[in-house]
Image (cartoon, rainbow, N blue to C red):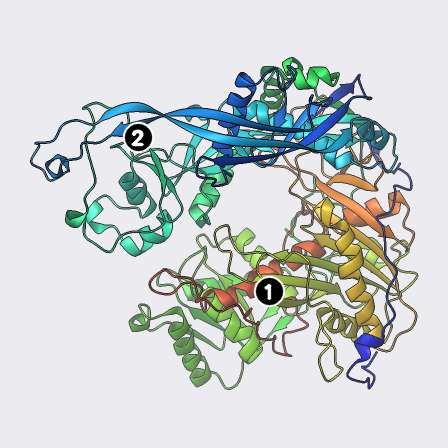
Amino acid sequence: MESPALPPNANLQQAALPKRSVIDRTGFGTSGRPISLLANHFKVSLRCPNEIFYQYSVSISSEDNGVVDNKGIGRKIAEKLYQTYSSEFAGKTFAYDGEKCLYTVGPLPQNTLELTVILEESIAKHPRSPSDYGDGSGSGKRSKHSLQSKAFKVEISYVAKIPLKSISLALQGAEAENVQDGLRVLDVILRQKAANKGCLLVRQSFFHDDTRTFSDVGGGVAAVKGFYSSFRPTHGGLSLNMDVSSTMILKPGPVVDFLLANQNLKDRRNIDWDKAKRMLKNLRVKARHNNREFKIIGLSEKPCNQQFFSLKVKNGGNARDDVSLQRYKKALSGMQRASLVEQSRQKPPERIRVVTDAVRNYQYDDDPLLISCGISIEKQLTQVDGRVLDVPKLKVGNGEDFFPRNGRWNFNNKKVLNPCRIECWSLVNFSARCDTSHLSRELINCGRNKGIHIERPYTIIEEDPQCSRASPFIRVERMFEQIMAKLPGPPEFLLCILPERKNSAIYGPWKKKCLTNLGIVTQCTCPSKINDQYLTNLLLKINSKLGGTNSLLALEHSRSLPLINDKPTLIIGMDVSHGSPGQSDIPSIAAVVGSRSWPLISRYRAAVRTQSPKVEMIESLYKPLENGEDDGIIRELLLDFYQTSNKRKPSQIIVFRDGVSESQFSQVLNIELDQIVKAYQHLGEVDVPKFTVVVAQKRHHTQLFQASAPENVPPGTVVDTKVVHPRNYDFYLCAQAGMIGTSRPAHYHVLLNEIGFSPDDLQNLVHSLSYVYQRSTTAVSIVAPICYAHLAAQQIGQFLKFEDSSETSSGQKSMSTAVPQLPRLHSNVAGSMFFC
């Protein structure tokens, strides 16, 4: 499979590929033992399916003709509109999304309305004489609050009809128009009900301003618990999907208290104002002196003693400079994330109780709009028939077979299947706390027990204490100067002890130096307790990176995987990693892993590229250059498959895609899959492989519970009826053992199935691919190829972190729009599972 000589415009000569559509469900699975389950879906009855929603466009402008686009003000205006002009609306209630859309059941008397709404707000009146300003003389009069009226012009015009019948047709499996529009109207009704209760709305979730739902996660930030609610068409009919949700808010209180907590300080004199400036930008504050809300756009360069504003408020006044129920959209620290996870955990019985209580308490059946649609909602969870798939048998060293129990296994008294041999290696230490000699001895002993031969390290190199205060880049360079001076040649492996367990600044420069400049396999760690379990987990990663195999599926080892063993099959995992919230200028990282050494499905190679920030579709699967060459990801993986699979070209390709929503399924089929086909054709191939394309989602809100037990559902639980899509081919699979909290199933959507897997074959393959994750001894919650793609994106993304110049020293963003390119991996490690 070598690149033919092609003219520079070869990519222009390729025929247009036919447009693909998402396939319908072809059947249901039957394998596995039955299990009775509950799902957090509440059955919805639709008694008036012939009703029609009327959609109207809303435009609000102030007295000076300025456009009003603030949702909070918009909802206040809509409320006043209903109170003032009930006759113009013929007494109809309406659903308003806070922005541009208003919906009624049946039409309004007129297609166009132009109305004026008067809102009154309380403002502070300030004295005008210079002596009344805050100069410390105390000579001024107190400010007074008065009501000020503001007029707004509201224009309402008819846009479209949205028949409720479209939802009924979709539930019967028809490809009805306006389905999403109809569901959107129902969701707007839910959101309006929450907004009227004073909730903070975040997409489909809502949160009460109630301190009992707050939990401190540190740094001046709190997690607030709320609920996700959305109407969903399912195989069992229309349902209300209700789930527990959480979002981050700034802890309400004085701004200076937030800054002290955010920077972990006790004395306000120690505040870092450069950090504060970045942190406060775009936050809302309420000023004490007039009780009005403002958005911070920056900090003045003048000192406080040169700032003047009117400050006349009664003693004991309630006004305060706080940020009540204001979302915190910036990236969380490692400590904050850990605290959030800890405080968000709920056991299944508690989650069931909380969600069921919410549906009862919100009294959706009393909503006038839902009543006029004939909609009523049951108050108990939906009963679902599930199945528990058989546990796949694994093979390890010495010809031993075994079955994992409860989704877990260990290597006690076991050897890895194919051990690597480590002869020339070194241990380098950036941490003053680690006993490196002890770690080295114990690693060698543990390796011997697992069948991995490890020679004594050629040398152990401790960092010069004088370097520890230097920049991470300098520290890494100094360490490599020592390595090159003390070793006879490049080592085959380096074990690196980091100074911190999480988010060490050394990690990015170290990995970049090893993987791109020198081509040395490396394992980073920061041991807190050195025991057999810790050492075993470390060795599983090392063995995988150096080309060994820890375990295989017995079916894989015996070459009896259905359909995969028959024809050369490439398995691809694809993921795109985006910058943290608030980092809109950080490039996105696209990572794709491809299986190698067919018919194995446990070994993978990764290819990683940067692309435009926040772009979800992978841009460089196929990347033709001016000279006619293809520099894309897929070519790299196709050639690797060919070279490691006895010169066999893949005639079948299974694609697992992570992180895309239902609205992007068509793009996966018609943009990304087209690129894969073009990359294949570019290599001179005429017969295009058959494809099976599966999207995996973890960020959804369907939870599964055992109907008659308080524990999480057992690993291998699959559901493909009742709560799945009424027409599309999808299923839920909980492959992992949920040890803490409530385990969330993965939601798999089959977009294309040209290979022809039966539902049982595909569900069992997906289940099996949760057991081939080489760096762990547990079934993972989503197929291993996707986990590997995520790891590769995460690790290579660290290369950019320490070079990041997105903000200058003044806090201003860089004006450069070019996406920085990642250096390519050294040929010595490009084919390794460096991401393990």
Identify residue type, mark 2. Asn
Asked if 228 appears above or below 435 in the picture, the reply is above
Quadrant containing the N terminus in the rendered view = bottom right
Of marks 2 and 1, which one's residue comes earlier in the chain?
A: 2
Quadrant containing the C terminus in the rendered view = bottom right
Q: Secondary structure at mark 2?
A: loop
Residue 683 picture location, percent across and down: 83, 77
Which of the pair 106/149 is nearer the observer? 149
Residue 681 picture location, percent across and down: 85, 73
Residue 546 picture location, percent across and down: 64, 70
Q: Which mark is residue 291?
A: 2
Q: Is residue 251 left or right of residue 110?
A: left
Residue 69 picture location, percent across and down: 51, 39
Identify residue type, mark 1. Ile
For the residues labelled 2 and 1, say whether their Cβ atoms are less than 8 Å apart.
no
Q: Is residue 606 left or right of residue 67?
A: right
Q: Secondary structure at mark 1?
A: helix
Q: Which mark is residue 542?
A: 1
Q: Is residue 154 visible?
A: yes
Q: Give the CA distance from mark 2 to mark 1.
A: 60 Å
Which of the pair 720/476 is nearer the observer? 720
Packing grade of label 1 (10 A; few <14, some 14-19, many >=20) is many
Packing grade of label 2 (10 A; few <14, some 14-19, many >=20) is some
Q: Is residue 277 left or right of residue 81?
A: left
Which of the pair 59/777 is nearer the observer? 59
Q: Which mark is residue 46?
A: none
Which of the pair 506/107 is nearer the observer? 107
Q: Residue at x 73, y 73 (%)?
A: 636
Q: Residue at x 77, y 66 (%)?
A: 675
